[in-house]
């Protein structure tokens, strides 16, 4: 059934809000959880439910993303027909009048016309979850909907985390009748939706003719009176990464075994680029507590409540607490790190201290020597 569905990961409207972590990369390629990138979650969710044609719309800072995704082999998307399509903004049609995200849909129309699927699943990368798109699609077909949008009914305790995000309004049949920014509304739109392919292409043409820029806002939500827009409530694990603080908070929450189980062990695997590394080495004097340690690390010092990516070297008497250390960083003798984020390939010289706050972690950009 899922062969009737093709996927689009639309990164065009996502802003790079993770400060130093997005100096050299787009948000979708930011490392997360010890060995993954943010895009791995939505991409794996699509692949796990049988979506075989997936396009990635990106506009800027996509070199790191292309290096990570490659041919799509880790996701079994390196296919003779279909598979993964990375589609940066490389078009030069002098007659093209499309604007905004509609440029991607218009100029990559071949992706849709050549695909055999009759419906399209569109998502961003900022909402990290482990969703079963099969359930969403079955409901979409059963309701004979034009569009099915995915939302989460969040608790009042976590609602402040979504203060600036759009919320959905429904009628008594569960159909969407509006979208607004309401600090009291708990129905957070996850920026994921399924739409009929023929309708998508029609709305794209209509929006371009009216000099609009957004398929979602100008094509779908401005036509709620004419479209049947259903809703699907997702109630599993959800992490919304739209700031440095939210990135740090959700990363550190993975040290809770219940949270880690919900994201990684409850359902099908989350795939990522494969790198062959030896097992991590714990040498004399190493002390590690409540941490995630990826392959290829060498630990001689103390690591507590932290996440270490591949190939990190923690030298003798170095102390790391409540921190995220990305690939190939070197923490030399006697250096102390607390409430910090180190981007990849950073080197901290001996006998230094880098201490931030839980609400404002100390961040060191990629390839820094401190």
Image (cartoon, rainbow, N blue to C red):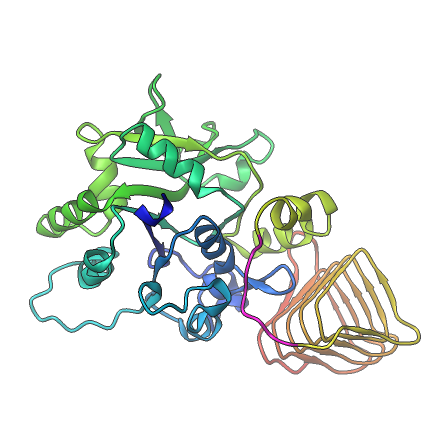
Can you give x and y, in whole percent of width and height, for residue 346 in the image?
A: 65, 78
* Span of residues in magenta: 269-276
Front in this rendered view, residue 106 or 210: 106
Instruction: Looking at this view, name the residue that lies furthest to the top.
Output: 172
Residue, x 31% and y 69% (percent of image)?
Answer: 88
Q: Position of residue 275 (x, y in %)?
A: 60, 75
Q: Is residue 321 above or below residue 300?
A: above
Q: Is residue 185 left or right of residue 352?
A: left
Image coordinates for residue 71, horizontal then vertical, percent: 42, 72
* Rendered location of residue 64, percent (x, y): 46, 74
The quarter holding residue 332 reads bottom right
Quadrant placement of the N terminus: top left
Q: Main secondary structure of the magenta part?
A: loop
Query: Where, quadrant-wise, is the C terminus in this rendering?
Result: bottom right
The residue most toward the right is: 284
Is 370 on the left or on the right of 12, as rendered? right
Instruction: Report the number of discs.
Output: 0
Residue sitting at x 73%, y 77%: 278
Q: Based on the picture, tell me whether residue 137 belongs to the magenta stretch.
A: no
Q: Viewer-proximal residue, 350 or 6? A: 6
């Amino acid at each position: 059934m899922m062969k009737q569905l093709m996927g689009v990961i639309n990164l065009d409207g996502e802003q790079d809000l993770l400060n130093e972590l997005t100096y050299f990369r787009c948000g979708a390629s930011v490392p997360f959880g010890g060995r993954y990138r943010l895009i791995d979650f939505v991409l794996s969710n699509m692949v796990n439910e049988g979506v075989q044609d997936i396009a990635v719309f990106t506009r800027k800072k996509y070199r790191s993303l292309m290096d990570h995704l490659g041919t799509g082999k880790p996701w079994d998307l390196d296919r003779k027909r279909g598979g993964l399509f990375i589609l940066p903004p490389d078009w030069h049609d002098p007659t093209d009048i499309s604007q905004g995200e509609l440029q991607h849909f218009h100029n990559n129309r071949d992706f849709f016309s050549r695909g055999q699927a009759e419906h399209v699943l569109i998502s961003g990368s900022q909402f990290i979850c482990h969703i079963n798109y099969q359930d969403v699609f079955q409901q979409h077909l059963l309701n004979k909907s034009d569009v099915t949008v995915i939302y989460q009914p969040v608790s009042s305790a976590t609602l402040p985390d979504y203060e600036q995000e759009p919320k959905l309004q429904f009628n008594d049949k569960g159909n969407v009748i509006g979208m607004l920014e309401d600090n009291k509304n708990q129905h957070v739109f996850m920026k994921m939706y399924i739409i009929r392919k023929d309708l998508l292409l029609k709305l794209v043409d209509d929006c371009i003719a009216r000099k609009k820029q957004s398929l979602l806002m100008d094509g779908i939500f401005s036509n709620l009176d004419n479209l049947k827009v259903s809703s699907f409530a997702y109630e599993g694990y959800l992490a919304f990464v739209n700031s440095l603080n939210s990135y740090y908070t959700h990363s550190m929450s993975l040290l809770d075994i219940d949270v880690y189980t919900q994201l990684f062990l409850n359902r099908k695997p989350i795939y990522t680029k494969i790198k062959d590394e030896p097992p991590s080495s714990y040498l004399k004097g190493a002390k590690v507590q409540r941490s995630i340690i990826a392959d290829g690390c060498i630990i001689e010092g103390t690591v507590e409540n932290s996440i270490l990516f591949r190939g990190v070297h923690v030298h003798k008497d170095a102390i790391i607490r409540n921190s995220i250390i990305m690939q190939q960083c070197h923490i030399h003798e006697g250096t102390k790190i607390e409430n910090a984020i180190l981007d990849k390939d950073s080197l901290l010289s001996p006998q230094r201290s880098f201490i931030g706050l839980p609400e404002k972690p100390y961040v060191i950009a990629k390839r820094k020597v401190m």
